[in-house]
Image (cartoon, coloured by chain):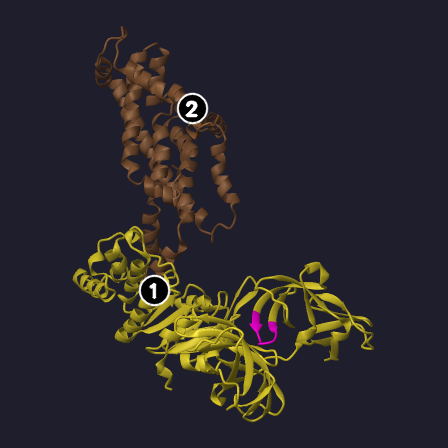
């Protein structure tokens, strides 16, 4: 791809607030005319990225290029970009017409030209008869249209949209999505769109950038992101999915839920632990159990309008989510199979917890900001060590004081037969735990690890 | 027996009737009566035929306007600085500006007199304006500060985004959106300054006479009917001022004006 096609380029951009890193080494380019969505849960850094591009924030590290030029010192009012704000930010002291004409008047454009342009965008957003209305008298959807009109009338090189549809109801949101997409095609302007709604991202975008924890997790077309998620976070965040622990036996052969399956992935090595993602609609479910890959019992069946959403307990004790046009009665035995192409194998990001620590005495080690008892060791006190703890060895307690330290449940992943929890500890580090118990996000937990489960490695 | 909710309003109703409504009615009655109690417009005619009183009245309004304008010119930038989180990071500075409002006006004025004595500066018209601005400045700052402080920062951002330089953001967005606070402030300063008299007496050694003093002198000298007429004229001026700004009071409520 030619360099000049990249209208916006972010190079190693980092941003910190009060010592907390909200964006960590972001590298991203956006092509001219592209519809790019920054997608992620709240606090993932997507809005910060947008504000950096708009110029309301300055990056602590890295640079942002617009048309190949560094725009570090350029104030927001000199950037050829316009923003549609989340809560619209329409000027309450101006009517619809003057709100839209605001940017053009600042450019000292002749009155008749302003008038022509304003009328054209009013028509475009279907608000022709509203020009002299006070903005406060408009409905949410109408305010949204005015906000979009106010931005596009300036013919920006890039239009930034910060969750513009978040405040609208579902029906209105879906209509506006279609209109936005149409508008994008008609105008040929580059759109950068921020949302936490994965459906919206998949519907609208040419390219989706999935973000989490201030980092880019995956960049790809909606189809790529959905069908080939690179890690369990993306798989879980985009659409529904069964995320399961598996073992790559050899190329194109994987074991999970107690069965061996053919798949299309290769290059992982032999007998390597992996994460396996299977979308609910990719599990074929039949009344007939003969000749199927595995069997199970339906434990729940909910009609979702187009499909039935079912939970199936397999004979081996794994729970899978299955979608099918036919519903099966709760309690009925079913046979299932999965096509090789529908099995998405991902490298495990980690197979156990590893912490930085330091031996304190022959029977204790310090990590996660606390001292932990260990079986007697001959590593000299004061030696820095790496501490390994298996996911299953972490005990989470209801009472915070029952644990050696405490933490807050940050992210929950169901793996068919267990929950894989990400816990933010009191020391600010992340701890991963496998458990059968049900926790909610943001629950405060005590953390306990038995001495014999703490393994030390001298660095 | 159940006490109706409206029953609780009775004590306040009595209070208002006795100390607000009744005095107003009395002023109106006295203003339209002569010493014998007969109806007359003579009191108003006397006002327009007494050049000294008429002059004091116009002079008072001039002083009040001047004071209001100075308060606005000093108060708006102060409020803007206070509300700007980059320039002012602590609420202590706000308290410091508001603090004079907690002290009795007479005490503040006596302190001003002492200050002028100490600095060997003459008392007179200059001291009067200084004292008035000093007394009323917080009443200008506070409503403006409130409006600016509660203003959604995204308006300024949106203006910048649309190409407005910081100066244009101020003139085209911040200033118009802070008008409810400005109107509140103007009212809070202008209305009480018209009727000031003690401040004028103390700070000018009775050399400068304001309309409040004229009213007080007449009442003290037993000219109740004429004094009441003068008070009514002043009330009319205040009423006209507040009616002038009333149309914006709804907005002021929403955006944090003081009244």
Residue B49: percent from left, percent from top: 21, 16
* Disc 2 packing (10 Å; few <14; some 14–19; many ≥20): few
Residue at left 40%, top 47%?
B148
- Marks 1 and 2, how far apart in space? 52 Å
Q: Chain of mark 2?
A: B
Q: According to the image, label 1 marks what residue?
A: A171
| Residue farthest along the top direction in this orientation | B36
Q: Chain of mark 1?
A: A
Q: Which chain is brown?
A: B
Q: Is residue A70 visible?
A: no
In the rendered structure, are the residues bearing label 1 and label 2 in contact, judged by CB atoms less than 8 Å apart? no
Residue at left 48%, top 34%?
B100
Q: According to the image, label 2 marks what residue?
A: B10
* Disc 1 packing (10 Å; few <14; some 14–19; many ≥20): few
Nearer the observer: mark 1 or 2; the answer is 1
Q: Which residues are magenta?
A: A412-420
Using the image as rendered, state which of residue A280 and residue B246 is in the foreground. Answer: A280
A4 lies above or below B59 = below
Query: In what quadrant of the picture does the N terminus of chain A appear?
Result: bottom left
| Residue farthest along the bottom direction in this orientation | A251
Q: Tell me the SS state at disc 2.
A: helix
Residue A429: percent from left, percent from top: 63, 68
Magenta stretch: includes residue A385: no
């Amino acid at each position: 791809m030619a360099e000049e096609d990249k209208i916006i380029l972010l190079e190693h951009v980092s941003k910190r607030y009060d010592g907390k890193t909200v964006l960590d080494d972001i590298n991203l380019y956006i092509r001219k005319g592209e519809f790019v969505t920054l997608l992620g849960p709240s606090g993932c850094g997507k809005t910060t990225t947008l504000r950096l591009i708009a110029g309301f924030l300055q990056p602590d590290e890295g640079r942002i290029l617009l048309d190949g030029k560094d725009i570090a010192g350029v104030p927001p009012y000199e950037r050829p970009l316009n923003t549609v704000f989340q809560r619209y930010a329409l000027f309450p002291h101006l009517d619809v017409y003057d709100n839209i004409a605001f940017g053009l008047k600042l450019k000292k454009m002749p009155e008749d030209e302003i008038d022509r342009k304003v009328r054209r965008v009013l028509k475009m957003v279907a608000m022709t008869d509203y020009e002299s209305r006070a903005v406060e008298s408009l409905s949410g959807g109408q305010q949204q249209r005015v906000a979009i009109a106010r931005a596009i009338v300036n013919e920006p090189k890039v239009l930034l949209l910060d969750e513009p549809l978040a405040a609208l109801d579902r029906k209105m949101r879906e209509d506006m999505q279609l209109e936005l997409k149409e508008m994008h095609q008609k105008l040929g302007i580059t759109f950068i769109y921020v949302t936490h709604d994965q459906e919206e991202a998949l519907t609208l975008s040419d390219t989706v950038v999935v973000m989490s924890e201030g980092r880019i997790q995956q960049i790809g077309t909606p189809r790529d992101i959905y069908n080939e998620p690179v890690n369990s976070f993306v798989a879980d965040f985009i659409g529904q999915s069964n995320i399961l622990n598996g073992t790559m036996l050899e190329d194109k052969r994987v074991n999970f839920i107690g069965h061996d399956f053919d798949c299309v992935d290769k290059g992982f090595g032999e007998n390597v632990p992996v994460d396996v993602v299977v979308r609910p609609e990719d599990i074929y479910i039949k009344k007939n159990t003969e000749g199927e890959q595995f069997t199970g019992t339906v434990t729940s069946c909910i009609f979702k309008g187009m499909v039935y959403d079912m939970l199936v307990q397999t004979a081996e004790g794994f729970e899978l989510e299955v979608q099918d046009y036919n519903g099966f009665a709760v309690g009925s035995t079913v046979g299932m199979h999965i096509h090789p192409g529908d099995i998405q194998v991902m490298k495990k990001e980690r197979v156990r917890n590893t912490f930085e620590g330091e031996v304190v005495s022959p029977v204790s080690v310090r990590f996660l900001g606390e001292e932990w008892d260990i079986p007697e060791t001959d590593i000299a006190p004061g030696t820095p060590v790496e501490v390994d703890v298996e996911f299953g060895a972490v005990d989470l307690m209801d009472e915070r004081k029952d644990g050696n330290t405490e933490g807050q449940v940050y992210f929950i992943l169901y793996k068919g037969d267990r929950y894989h929890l990400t816990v933010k500890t009191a020391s600010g580090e992340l701890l991963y735990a496998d458990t059968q118990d049900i926790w909610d996000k943001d629950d405060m937990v005590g953390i306990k690890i038995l001495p014999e489960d703490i393994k030390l490695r001298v660095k | 027996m159940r006490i109706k909710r409206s029953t609780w309003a009775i004590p306040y109703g009595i209070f208002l009737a006795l100390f607000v409504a009744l005095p107003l009615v009395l002023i109106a009655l006295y203003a339209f009566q002569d010493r014998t109690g007969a109806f007359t417009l003579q009191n108003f005619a006397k006002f327009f035929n007494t050049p000294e009183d008429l002059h004091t009245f116009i002079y008072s309004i001039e002083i009040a306007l001047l004071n209001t304008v100075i308060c606005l010119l000093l108060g708006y930038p102060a409020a803007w600085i206070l509300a700007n989180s980059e320039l002012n990071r602590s609420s202590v500075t706000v308290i410091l500006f508001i603090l004079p409002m907690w002290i009795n006006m007479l005490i503040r004025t006596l302190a001003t007199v002492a200050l002028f004595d100490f600095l060997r500066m003459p008392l007179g018209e200059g001291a009067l304006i200084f004292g008035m601005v000093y007394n009323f400045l917080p009443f200008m700052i506070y409503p403006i500060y409130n409006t600016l402080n509660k203003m959604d920062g995204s308006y300024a951002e949106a203006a910048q985004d649309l190409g407005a330089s910081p100066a244009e953001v101020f003139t085209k967005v911040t200033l118009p959106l802070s008008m409810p606070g400005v109107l509140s402030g103007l009212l809070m300063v202008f209305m009480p300054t018209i009727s000031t008299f003690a401040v004028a007496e103390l700070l000018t050694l009775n050399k400068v006479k304001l309309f409040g003093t004229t009213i007080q002198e007449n009442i003290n000298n037993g000219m109740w009917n004429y004094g009441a007429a003068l008070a009514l004229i002043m009330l009319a001026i205040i009423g006209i001022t507040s009616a002038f700004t009333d149309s914006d009071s709804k907005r002021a409520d929403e955006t944090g004006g003081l009244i």
